[in-house]
Amino acid sequence: MSVERALEETGNWLDDRLHGARGVRVLLRKVFPDHWSFLLGEIILYSFIILLLTGTFLTLWFQPSMTDVIYHGSYIPLRGVRMSEAYASTLKISFDVRGGLLIRQIHHWAADLFMAAIFAHMIRIFFTGAYRKPREINWLIGIVLLTLGLLEGLFGYSLPDDLLSGAGLRITEGVLQSIPIVGSYLAYFLFGGPFPGNQIIPRMYILHVLLIPGLILALVTVHLFLMFHQKHTQMPGKGRTNTNVVGAPMYPYFMAKTGAFFFFTFAALALAATFTQINPIWLYGPYNPVAMSAGSQPDFYMGWLEGALRIMPPWQWVWFNHTWAFNVFIPALVPLGLVFGGAAAWPFVEQWITGDRREHHLNDRPRNAPTRTAIGITVIAFYGVLWAEGANDIIADHLDIPLYWVTWGARVGIFVVPAIAYIVTKRICLGLQLKDNHLIEHGVETGIIRQLPGGEFIEETRPVDEDTLAVLTSRIAHPALPSGETAEAEVPAPGMRGALGKVRERMYRVITESAPMPDGHGNGHGNGHGNGHAVDGGQESLPAGATSAGPGTDAGEDQH
């Protein structure tokens, strides 16, 4: 029996029972747009898969216990030292298990890559407006995934019970205790008694290997399902409209490309783990509540918390026989709450301000939404100041300047740097819009100088090509707000009444501020309407769910 015949009979047998042939055909013909920034989502998925695989390996030898033992392993400098069983088992994985140190480092690098990719992916979605209707739910799922990733990283980082991770646990306890009234009870409940207790490692182990990964896996599944159902957004370009998806089908092009990218991601992590040391716990020693390492730093994604705690003045009050540690509570919870809460509310706030309730499947260029892009850069600058302040002692040491100079610089910079970032970013975006308008109206400079009969010198230009023109004209205008008055009398329209209506009107002017769009009569020869309509170039209109691929190409178009 040939291989083809065996596969055919197996497929028929499965289809007779599961009736999945039609669904598989639709899935294999699914069109995926092509843009480098879309790889960020794939990096998140693949690094998570690598985390699951390497984490499974590590659980075979890790002992989540705080029972004291005397170390007699291979690492000579720590022989005879009293330590927890969790720390001893981590040393065993690093020095006695074949390939253990490599797997440990792949796991740690994959965790850092996972968080970095989530940050970058969320930034890309925000800058391009890919969170807009109908993708608000996926945006909220992304914020929850980012929050769970922070907790997962914190708990996994703390499991070895070394001196550095123990300092992070001490900060976690302090943050919990800073919550007014109930803080001390929450800390006592989590640690099972006074810090450090003997229950925190087993409890974090369950959260790290079972509960949070299960939640992340479930949310990733829902995220992918919604992405398949709502179709992938695409970047502006020739033939790309709000009602289609232009790209390559899943089989064979996308499957081959994404499969290769998985192995590329794994290879990059393996190379990083092989040649770049990370988290050498044997150098820190076992955790001791009365000791603290100099220059200790958390992983990059928790740097904002370290910086926020260091930047805060010592505000601590006693009210009604309770200590209110605002110097810990405010920096630990307020910045994170503002950023994550604001990000979750933004799609709905923007929709309310602009009145834009249309579906958006074509992404914005960041320059075409100057205020949104400026707000995003402002948040990044805010995070960057806190992140840098988290290393204020190292900065002061390397630059040989007083520590308090760095701290006060950060206290001023936390207000000044984001404001400057907002203004500069918005000016840059508006300038880039004007540049695009110039290209549309006057074309591209050729460098050819021609003298007119009257003696005047001019530079010849040529029209922009169709692909570039489709990108330049992709900007669309926001819908106008309801009129502030009726034709008969000065009666505010619904939704524009009172102080809230005035606030909405002013915010609308800020949000929609852009350079005027050209009228489409320049020598760029575009349609000038920013609707992304296809021009003659071999692109055809297809029925829903269909794909197109010309001879020798992988291109396809999927209609909404």
Image (cartoon, rainbow, N blue to C red):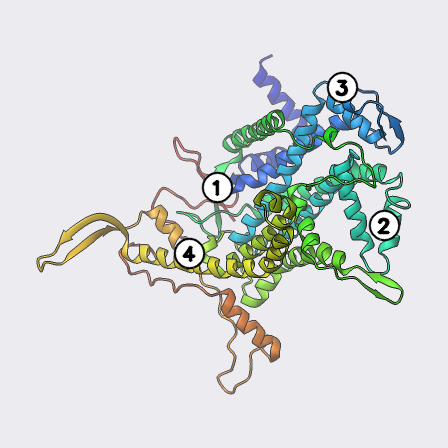
**Mark 2 highlights which residue?**
187
Label 3: element kind? loop
**Mark 1 highlights which residue?**
35
Which is more foreground, mark 4 or mark 2? 2
**Mark 3 highlights which residue?**
96
* For residue 552, above or below residue 308: above
Label 2: element kind? helix
Q: Are marks 3 and 4 in contact (CB under 8 Å)?
A: no
**Mark 4 highlights which residue?**
531
Q: Earlier in the sequence, mark 4 or mark 2?
A: 2
Residue count near mark 3 (Cα–Cα under 10 Å), binned few <14, some 14–19, many ≥20: some
Q: Are marks 4 and 2 in contact (CB under 8 Å)?
A: no
Task: Give the residue at the far bottom of this rendering.
Answer: 489
As measured in the structure, the alpha-carbon distance from the residue carrying label 4 to the one carrying label 2 is 56 Å
Task: Give the residue at the far top of this rendering.
Answer: 1
Give residue 14's position: percent from left, percent from top. 67, 27
Give residue 424's position: percent from left, percent from top. 47, 59
Q: Which of marks 3 and 1 is nearer the N terminus?
A: 1
Which is more foreground, mark 3 or mark 1? 3
**Left or right relative to 424: residue 493:** right
As measured in the structure, the alpha-carbon distance from the residue carrying label 1 to the one carrying label 2 is 46 Å
Camera-nearest residue between 407 and 413: 407
As measured in the structure, the alpha-carbon distance from the residue carrying label 4 to the one carrying label 1 is 20 Å
Q: Earlier in the sequence, mark 3 or mark 4?
A: 3
Q: Which of marks 4 and 1 is nearer the N terminus?
A: 1
